[in-house]
Image (cartoon, rainbow, N blue to C red):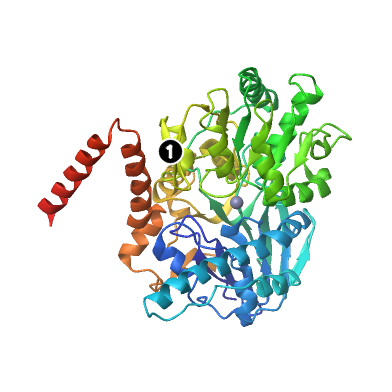
């Protein structure tokens, strides 16, 4: 019997997880993620799927992050009305994440169409609408961890905790082959793997001994310093205590899902044990508040919480719903802890808080996650003395601090350990979901660990493999990619000139802002013009 596996995302790309497994009796999709990053990749979100959506038997989902789930409503719009299997935690997160994503699509397209009309160009349609998202949510069927479920004729699936975010899973499949000697083919899709030392998630699990493994490689080339719960809390404690001692407010930009809840949980623990004063904590992000509600409903799934106590219900935690309430926080001159999104300071309510805190010399901004190039968070981290927020120039006098003890992703060592714990993998290991450098480092790490190099495959976008019992994985055809060679190279880096240009723009503006005089600024611009004239 022929079993084929197509890599329609997260292969040769960092985002857009999407795999299609084909047997004579079923067509199974694992993840349906949105492409992010380079422009050419994002354009794929608008193109038709490279498969017939209405011909699918079932869809299985590893977790709620947009690069794994973000195109599910598009699947519904394209005619898929069958089941979408996932864990209860993921299902609950999706109830607001998918409609929210739809609203973003609709708003972006509305703005784009205004420009299109002015340029006398054809209008575009949103990838999907809030209606599509609502319909899609009705297709979700939930399944707990560790239970075998028949998901399609001849295919059973089992979800393993991946320790990455609430509800996240690796999915194991057992596929009937019709072969009497080897009646089943087993495979494992890693999804995203969490770190060993996650604040709220138990370490990732998985089966031992499979035929095929698809392993993510996000941090395949990045080791991190590991700290246990006590170490992580001690680092946070010092930062919060110093910030409160300065007499001003503490602003923590944080991702809405998982990171905000980790912070609330650790702050709650430190206050409960009198290691920190019970300062008011303002959770000021509508998305983070919705996510926190979901976490509250799934307390039993979380690791590291004090028995019987929910940090999400602490009396000093204030969930700030309305914009008016959010603005009222600006009147507080000191002693408050404000957690707000986005985590990289490039959008959301955190920007108005930055406007009100950055100029105060007794205020503190604590960065707790990765800050990408071109974001305001990265500028602050680099130590600039002035920034521009909503057209206003703000002096940076606040203390800018950053800590690297919160992470949603397994690092290089964690990933390698997780893969080794799955051995033996008898037929092949596919490495996906990483930049070229991360994939190469992950591959080298596996070879050094004694895994035969011909068993490790790094597939490219849109490639299809025959999963043979005897021979292992075999590439079928040339595998026509939706991206040409140039675009493929950009996709593999997760970066293109437009990303670069945006980051450069931010850097340049900031560089000019931080010069002493208008005369110096004009001189720099003149020099730029001179260089451009020379090159053209
Ligand atoms: Zn993820």
Relative to 36, does residue 435 appear above or below in the rendering?
A: above
Residue 84 seen anywhere in this rendered image of the structure: yes
- On the image, the x and y values in percent for residue 279 come to 74, 27
Indicate whether 301 appears above or below 129: above
Numbered-mark total: 1
Residue plotted at (30% across, 30% down): 516
Q: Is residue 258 visible?
A: no
Q: Is residue 85 left or right of residue 109?
A: right
Q: Position of residue 506 (x, y in %)?
A: 38, 45
For disc 1, the neighbor class at 10 Å (few under 14, some 14 to 19, many from 20) is many
**On screen, 327 above or below 214?**
above
Closer to the camera, 534 or 355? 355
Q: Measuring from the top left, give residue 236's x and y in whole percent.
A: 64, 25
Q: Secondary structure at mark 1?
A: strand
Q: Quadrant of residue 54?
A: bottom right
Residue 69 drawn at (x, y percent): 62, 62
Q: Dividing the image into 4 quarters, which one contains the N terminus?
A: bottom right
- Asked if ligand 1 lies within 8 A of label 1, the reply is no
Q: From the image, tell me which residue sits under label 1.
A: 387
Considering depth in this image, is 245 or 478 the residue closer to the camera? 245
Identify the residue shown where x is 73% and y is 45%: 320
Image-based side of 312 in relation to 37, left or right? right
Give the vertical position of 462 relative to 512 (above or below).
below
Pick out the residue farthest to the left: 534
- The residue positioned 46% from the left and 73% from the top of the image is 114
Quadrant where the C terminus is found in the figure: bottom left
Task: Kindly identify the residue that appears in the image at 65 percent across and 76 percent down.
Answer: 76
């Amino acid at each position: 019997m022929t079993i084929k596996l197509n890599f329609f995302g997260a292969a040769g790309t960092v985002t857009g997880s999407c795999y299609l497994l084909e047997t004579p009796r079923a067509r199974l999709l694992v993840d349906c993620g949105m492409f992010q990053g380079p422009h050419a990749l994002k354009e794929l979100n608008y193109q038709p799927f490279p498969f017939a959506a209405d011909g699918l038997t079932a869809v299985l989902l590893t977790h709620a992050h947009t690069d794994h789930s973000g195109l599910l409503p598009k699947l519904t719009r394209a005619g898929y009305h069958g089941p979408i299997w996932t864990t209860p935690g993921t299902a609950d997160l999706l109830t607001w994440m998918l409609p929210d994503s739809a609203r973003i699509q609709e708003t972006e397209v509305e703005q784009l169409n205004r420009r299109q009309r002015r340029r006398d160009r054809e209008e575009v349609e949103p990838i999907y609408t809030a209606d599509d998202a609502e319909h899609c949510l009705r297709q979700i069927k939930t399944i707990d961890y560790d239970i075998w479920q028949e998901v399609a004729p001849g295919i059973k699936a089992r979800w393993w905790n991946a320790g990455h975010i609430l509800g996240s899973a690796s999915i194991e499949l057992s596929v009937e082959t019709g072969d009497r000697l080897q009646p089943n083919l087993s495979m494992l899709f890693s999804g995203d793997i969490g770190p060993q030392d996650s604040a709220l998630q138990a370490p990732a699990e998985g089966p031992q001994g499979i035929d095929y493994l698809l392993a993510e490689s996000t941090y395949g080339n990045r080791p991190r310093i590991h700290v246990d719960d006590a170490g992580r809390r001690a680092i946070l404690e010092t930062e919060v205590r110093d910030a409160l001692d300065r007499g001003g407010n503490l602003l923590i930009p944080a991702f809405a899902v998982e990171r905000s809840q980790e912070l609330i949980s650790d702050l709650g623990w430190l206050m409960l044990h009198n290691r920190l004063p019970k300062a008011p904590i303002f959770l000021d992000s509508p998305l983070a508040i919705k996510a926190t509600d979901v976490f509250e409903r799934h307390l039993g799934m979380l690791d590291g919480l004090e028995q019987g106590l929910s940090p999400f219900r602490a009396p000093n935690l204030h969930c700030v719903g309305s914009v008016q309430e959010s603005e009222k926080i600006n009147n507080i001159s000191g002693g408050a802890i404000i957690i707000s999104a986005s985590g990289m300071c490039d959008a959301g309510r955190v920007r108005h808080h930055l406007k009100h805190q950055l100029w105060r010399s007794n205020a503190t901004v604590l960065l707790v996650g990765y800050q990408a190039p071109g974001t305001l968070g990265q500028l602050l981290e680099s130590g600039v003395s002035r920034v521009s927020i909503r057209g206003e120039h703000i002096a940076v006098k606040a203390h800018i601090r950053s800590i690297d003890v919160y992470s949603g992703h397994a690092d290089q060592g964690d990933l390698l350990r997780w893969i080794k714990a799955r051995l033996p993998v008898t037929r092949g290991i596919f490495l996906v979901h990483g930049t070229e450098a991360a994939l190469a480092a992950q591959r080298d790490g596996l070879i050094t660990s004694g895994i035969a190099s011909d068993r490790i495959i790094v597939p490219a976008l849109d490639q299809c493999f025959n999963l043979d019992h005897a021979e292992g994985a075999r590439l079928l055809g040339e595998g026509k990619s939706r991206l040409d060679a140039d675009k493929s190279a950009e996709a593999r880096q997760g970066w293109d000139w437009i990303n670069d240009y945006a980051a450069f723009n931010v850097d340049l503006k900031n560089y000019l802002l931080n010069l002493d005089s208008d005369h110096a600024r004009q001189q720099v611009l003149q020099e730029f013009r001179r260089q451009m004239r020379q090159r053209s």
